[in-house]
Image: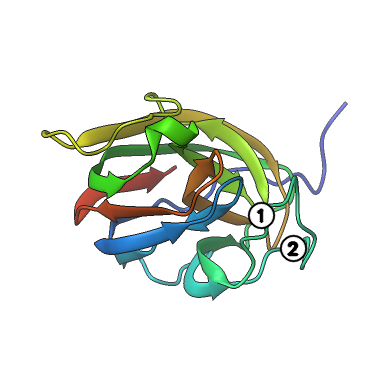
Amino acid sequence: MTLTNSTKLQSTEAQGDFSEATAAAVAAEVAESLALEGVTPAVNGDWTYSGTAEGRTGEVAVNGIDLDGEPGLIYSGPPGNAVRVKFTNLDIDHGLIAPEAGDTAAVALFVNNDIIAFADEGFVAELDAEPAIEFNLDTYVPGLQTSDVIRIGIVGGGEETLDLDVAVGGTINIV
C-alpha cells in the first residue's frame, strides 16, 4: 500500500516578544489578548501576526469570551496540523486586584475564543508585591484549521475590572 497526495504536517516557526501593556483593563470573567512585537517572520507560509485578528469561528463567544479583533497569530498552514506553543518570562509586575472581592487573574493560551491551556501560575489573587509574577507555558495544540488564531491572553476572575501592567519582554515560540 502506498500513500499518494500526502502532506507533511509541519508549520514554519513563529516567534516574538510580548509588548508592554500599561493598565490593561480585564473585566471579570472576560479575557484580553496580549500584543506581540518583533514577530519573525511577520508573514510567512504558515503564520501572520495581526493586531486585530479575526478567528475562523467569527464573532462566536465561548463562555463569555470573545477575542476577535484582538492581537493574535493567524494560521494558514495545512488543516489538521499540531504545533508546540511555548511562552516564557511573561511578567505581570503589578496591578490592582481586589482580593477581598475574590478577584483573580490568569494567563491562558487561546485558539480562536477557546481556552486551550493555562500558564503555570494558574489564577493569582495578589499582584501588588515585588517581584513580578512570571507566567510560562509549554503545550501542544492539535488539529489546527486554516484561519485559526492563536492568542495569549489574561483572563479575569471575580467581580471587578482588573488594571494590570504587563512588562515588556517575554517570548513566544510556535514550532
Identify which residue, 169 or 164, lies in the foreground: 164
Q: At 47% across and 53% down in the image, what residue appears?
A: 12
Above or below — where is 8 with respect to 74?
above
| Helix, strand or loop under label 1 | loop
Number of other residues with Cα within 10 Å of mark 1, as a class: few under 14, some 14 to 19, many 20 or more: many
Tags 2 and 1 touching, CB below 8 Å? yes
Task: Say left or right for 46 vs 170.
Answer: right
What residue is shown with label 2? 56
Relative side of 64 to 1, left or right: left
Left or right, residue 116 beside residue 57 = left
Percent across and percent down for residue 137 are 40, 31
Residue at x 82%, y 36% (from the top left corner): 3
Residue 140 pos. (x, y %): 55, 30
In the image: residue 36, left or right of residue 50: left
So how many labels did they put on this image?
2
Relative height, residue 41 to residue 102 (above, below): below
Would you name the residue on which mark 1 appears? 112
Asked whether residue 74 is in view, the answer is yes
